[in-house]
Amino acid sequence: MSHQHPEGHPQSFETLAIHAGQEADSLTGAVVPPIYQVSTYKQDGVGGLRGGYEYSRSANPTRTALEENLAALEGGRRGLAFASGLAAEDCLLRTLLVPGDHVVIPDDAYGGTFRLFAKVVERWGWSGRSPTPPTRRPYGPRSAPVRR
């Protein structure tokens, strides 16, 4: 979908919120995308994804519409939607961190964040900890040196 008004000016935020990521269904012509409640998609052969979809947990047309809508609203080229906040956090950490990096975790972070660091990511050479109460100074002398 083009994010330009027919007269050439950009669509408003409200218009994008309603219409971005919503192409008319090629089979039925429906103007509101259907909710696809399927687990797997027929393949055209090994590695031959039909329409780019294989298994709904990794991608599906409903989620694609949401991701395109969010990207348009944020002015981005691409959007990503996750099943949980921890899944999004894990993806972000794996994308940005390299061995030796240290993350300061807020005291009130989701408990799964602490478990993710304690049981998973520390094996990859990353570390993370919360500022020690009662100082609660994330940038005080107790913080690890910044590498980058």
Image (tube, rainbow, N blue to C red):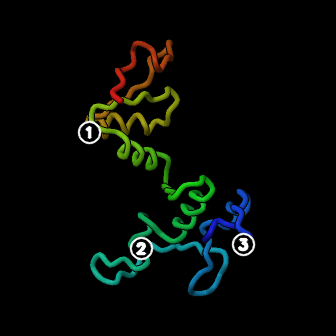
Residue 102 image position (x, y, % from top left): 35, 29
Residue 146 image position (x, y, % from top left): 36, 24
Q: Which of marks 3 and 1 is nearer the N terminus?
A: 3
Which three-letter amino acid code belongs to the residue tagged 3? Pro
Name the residue at the bottom extreme: 27
The residue drawn where x is 39% and y is 19% is: 143
Residue position for label 2: 52
Report how far apart the C-alphas of labels 1 and 2 lie in the structure. Answer: 31 Å
Q: In which quarter of the image is the N terminus?
A: bottom right
Residue 20 image position (x, y, % from top left): 63, 65
70 left or right of 57 in image: right
Residue 89 image position (x, y, % from top left): 44, 44
Location of residue 113 (image quadrant): top left
Location of residue 98 (image quadrant): top left
Secondary structure under tag 1 reads helix
Q: Earlier in the sequence, mark 2 or mark 3?
A: 3
Q: In which quarter of the image is the C terminus?
A: top left
Residue position for label 1: 124
Disc 1: CA contacts within 10 A as few (<14), some (14-19) or many (>=20) = some
Along the line of sight, the residue nearer the viewer: 47 or 40: 47
Which three-letter amino acid code belongs to the residue tagged 1? Trp
Proximity of marks 3 and 1: CB atoms separated by less than 8 Å: no
The residue drawn where x is 54% and y is 61% is: 67
Secondary structure under tag 2 reads loop
Using the image, tell me which numbered label, if any, was put on residue 6: 3
> In the rendered image of this protein, does residue 16 appear above or below residue 43?
above
Q: Which of marks 1 and 2 is nearer the N terminus?
A: 2
Proximity of marks 1 and 2: CB atoms separated by less than 8 Å: no
Along the line of sight, the residue nearer the viewer: 33 or 97: 97
